[in-house]
Every structure is written in C-alpha cells, then in structure tokens.
Amino acid sequence: MLGLIMNRQLTITSIMEHARKFHGDAEVVSVTADQPLHRYTYREAFARSARLANALARLGILQGERIGTLAWNDYRHLEVYFATSCAGFVCHTINPRLFPEQIEYIVEHAEDRWLFVDPAFVPLLEALKHRLGCVEGFVILGPAGAAAKTTLRNAVDYETLIAGEPDTFDWPELDENSACAMCYTSGTTGNPKGVVYSHRALVLHTYACLMPDVMSLSAREVVMPVVPMFHVNAWSIPYGAAAVGAKLVFPGPKMGDGETLQRLIEGEGVTVTAGVPTVWLALLTHLDRTGKQVPSLRRVIVGGSACPRTIMEEFEHEHGVHVHHAWGMTEMSPMGTFNSPSADFDTLSSEEQWAQRLRVGRPVYGVEVKIVDAAGKELPWDGVSFGALKVRGPWICAEYFRIGKGDAHDDEGWFETGDVATIDRRGYVAITDRTKDVIKSGGEWISSIDLENTAVAHPAVAEAAVIGAYHPRWDERPLLCVVLHPGEQLTREEMLAWFEGKVAKWWVPDDVVFVDGLPHTATGKLSKKDLRERMKDYRFP
C-alpha cells in the first residue's frame, strides 16, 4: 500500500520560487570589488537570475552541463547559484586557493563550458588559459567594461552578458535526483575528486540546517556567511536563508578582514555568522585592538577545524556571543554534526559543559554515524574508544564524478570519512585526528587535536600543530610546532610545562619546535602532510 500524498519534486527552484513569493522584500547586502556596499532584495536577485538563465540558454548551454565559478561571496555569485541550478545546469564552484595545477585538472575533469570569474582571479586563469581547452568563454563578475583588459578568450563582463535579457524565465520541471551543484575535494592526496549534489540532497540538507538544534535560521535573523560560497555551497546558508527569508550579508573579498566584518555586523545588524576559526581570530584581534563591538551578534558557527576554547570564551565573556562547533565534509554537502546543548546541559558542571561544547556536536537528523576499529568492528559510544568514523545518509556522496565509489565507500552504504573519533553516551562526536595524521605511540593512540587545542590556550601561542615523529623505542612520539604571537617569548620548558595536569602525562609532546608559520591547505586547515615533509629530517634530542 502506498501513501496518498502528492509527489512534488524537491528542487532548488522550489526554494527560489518560495523566497520570491513570500520573502521578496528581504535584503541581500554585498561587499564587491566594484562597490563598497551593494544592496537589493531577493525579488531583484531572482529577476537577475532569470536574466542570466536566458543568457546561458542563448549561449547554448544544455541541461546537465557544468558552469564553473571562481568567485567571492557576493550578490552576483548568488545569482549564478540559482540561475544555473534552477535552469537545469550544474553550478560548479571552484576553490581559487587551490594550486593552479589542481584548478586546471578540476576544470578539465568537470568539462566546464563557461567560467564565471571574480576580477581578482582573472590573472590566475590568464596563466592557465591555453590549458583549459573545454572552456568556451569567461564571464568577468563585474560591471560593464570589466572584461576589456583581460587576455582571456571570448571574455564578457557579467553586466553586459545579462543586459537586455528578460527578467522572467521558463524554469523547467526538474527531476529532484538530477544534478544541481558540484564541488571538488581539496585533493591533499592524489587528484581532487568531484562530488555531485542532487536537488533532492541539497533541499533535504537545507531542511536539516534550518532545524532549531542546528542553524535555527528564520526571517528574523541577519546571516553573514563568511564560509566561502566556493566551498561546499557555503554550508547551505544561501539556500537556507532564502527558504526562510533571512537577510543575507556577504563580505565579498573582505571575508578575512576583521575591520570589514565588524563594520558589517554592526551596520547591518548581523545576528548569525559562520566560518573557520582563523576568521574569528582576525575579528577578535580587531575588536581587542580598537575597542569596537558586535552588538547584534548572537551566534557564531565554526567548522573546518577545531575552534580553540580561548576563542569561544572570548566571544562569550567579552561579547555575549555563543560559539557552536559543526563538522562535515565536501562529501556530506557538508553538514554532519552540530553542537547545540543537550537536554541536561544546565545540570552539568562547568567542566562537563565545556567538555560537551568542545566536541563537534551530535549528528543532525538524516546522518547516521558509527566508529569502527581496524578490523571493522563497531566500537561503543563511551567517549573513550577511538575509531574510524563512518557516515551515511541522503545527502552523502555515493560515488565520485567519473571515478566511482572509491576506497572510502563500503558495500553497506557507509562512507569512511578519514577521521578518527570518539562518541560519548549522548551521541556527541569528538574528532581526534585524521586517519592519516593519528599518532600511535607504543601501540596507543594520541590525539593531536587535543594537544593542539591545549597549546593554543597558552596566551603566548598564536597557532600550533602536532605531528608524529619517529622514536626508536615508541615508534612515534608527538612533536609540537608552535607559532608565537608577535612580541611574545616562550621557552621549550615553559611550553611543555603548560601541558601538566591538562592531558595524560604520556601524551605530553617530547619536544617543541618554534616556527615562523605553519602550512595550510586551500580551505585554511593545517596541512599536516606538508608539515611532516618540512620536518622529515627532525630527530628527537
């Protein structure tokens, strides 16, 4: 027996149409290279998306073909998001911080027909133009005349492309399982791999993100996604904000600038924002230096890497802002877990509360998780047992574009994330390491992330990374690499003494190396692979 319910397709088009009808007057505010502050409404945004869809149809783009973007968070990029997906094309966001060789590989592998490019990234593509044979033309995301000086072939500026086009479009009836967006992994080992998102997956993911114990967005919120739109759909914030009618504030090329972020938060009344920890360190440094405030801000969502407790405490104690951990992956669209308080949170001691808050949260509805040992046996949720973290769900990658399942997918539909984790009895997940970064000393695992978080809690430490270095007796022992704040001084002995009473004695690193800087990936995460290469000749005293 089947249910007697209408079978309406879950598509990004339905989000756009709902926002246009019911939230058309909500604002979208952007910083762009050509305008210090652009302001318009969702209604105007979607009218311009229709004009772009008409222009793309005129260029002969067919359903399922890829349109690439290398762009900041701003209103033009938002228009491309909706125009491409809703017209039946695939919006392929590309991380411009990747190595040029990786960008070349990604564009060619995806077979992008046109690339939409922020003016800041034009020189990057000019150096690659002769190797991007699949690309028919380039759209410069700027005003009329923006394409005049580029040597990119068949280049046109965005405003000229859509000028004169109708502001309505006959949006096709799409199958919810058809592709609508695409993003490649950062490719720390081997070539980047393409993840293709369906309309259904992203609509379900958007629903999940909007839930009260997740992002809890509403028409009363003002949301500023600092997480890039070129990285996993900006964590679904462009879709979620449109679905509920939240005001959107885009920082454009200034997403890492503390002064701009503070000005936008105060000037636009931002209540919720999301991004990686390095962004919030820049904002807090600016606030501390200038005495400026963020009076409207209530919540900060942190993902990408673990947020140090010091950042969370400074936001809370100095500015009344609550920091939420979240965790996910490109392969997960990306939301996997979100840290909201448990039902018994208020009955816990202060340290128990912090122990919970420093975890990446519980799986959101729709995501199943488990941890397994080296033999594949499922481990208990006791907060102590370490295991490889596996996930499955309706917005998790089933296979990679033109590659297939790969080694990370098993026959039961589980995807191995590459993370090592513990799960406590309430279901809160703690990521302790990447599988390839785990330190195994004398047969026992040591969490490099816990050691790093302890190190950066020292007031003199700006950034820290822990890797396993060869030890003749224990096979591996932790080596701590530290970047100090400007003007600060710290000895090896003082740094190691800081760990006393904070971690197990046998976890304490065997040595400290002070460095001027640490390597990072294109998405801002510490690159342990590059750090291990840099320290390959190191030997413990």
Image (tube, grey):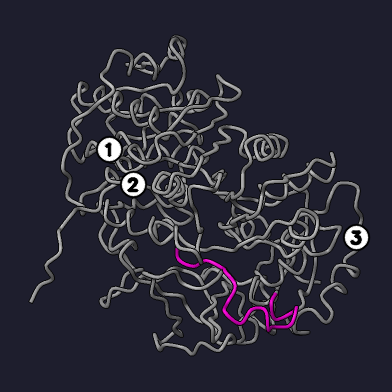
Say which element carries label 3: loop
Q: Tell me the crowding category of disc 1: few under 14, some 14 to 19, or many 20 or more residues within 10 angstroms, Cα based.
A: many
Q: On screen, 254 above or below 336?
A: above
Q: Tell me the crowding category of disc 3: few under 14, some 14 to 19, or many 20 or more residues within 10 angstroms, Cα based.
A: few
- As drawn, is 176 to the left or to the right of 148? left
Q: On screen, 5 above or below 219?
A: below
Q: Residue at x 44, y 83 (%)?
A: 372
Gap in angstroms between the C-alphas marked 3 and 2: 45 Å
Tell me where residue 270 sits by quadrant.
top right
Q: Earlier in the sequence, mark 3 or mark 2?
A: 2
Q: Which residues are magenta?
A: 335-353
**Label 2, on which residue?**
182
Q: On screen, 473 above or below 165?
A: below
Quick check: marks 2 and 1 in contact, CB under 8 Å?
yes
The type of residue carrying mark 1 is Arg
**Label 3, on which residue?**
490
Q: Earlier in the sequence, mark 3 or mark 1?
A: 1
User: Where residue 290 sits in the image (x, y, percent)?
Assistant: 84, 39
Discs 3/1, front: 1
Gap in angstroms between the C-alphas marked 3 and 1: 52 Å
Which numbered disc covers residue 66? 1
Say which element carries label 1: strand
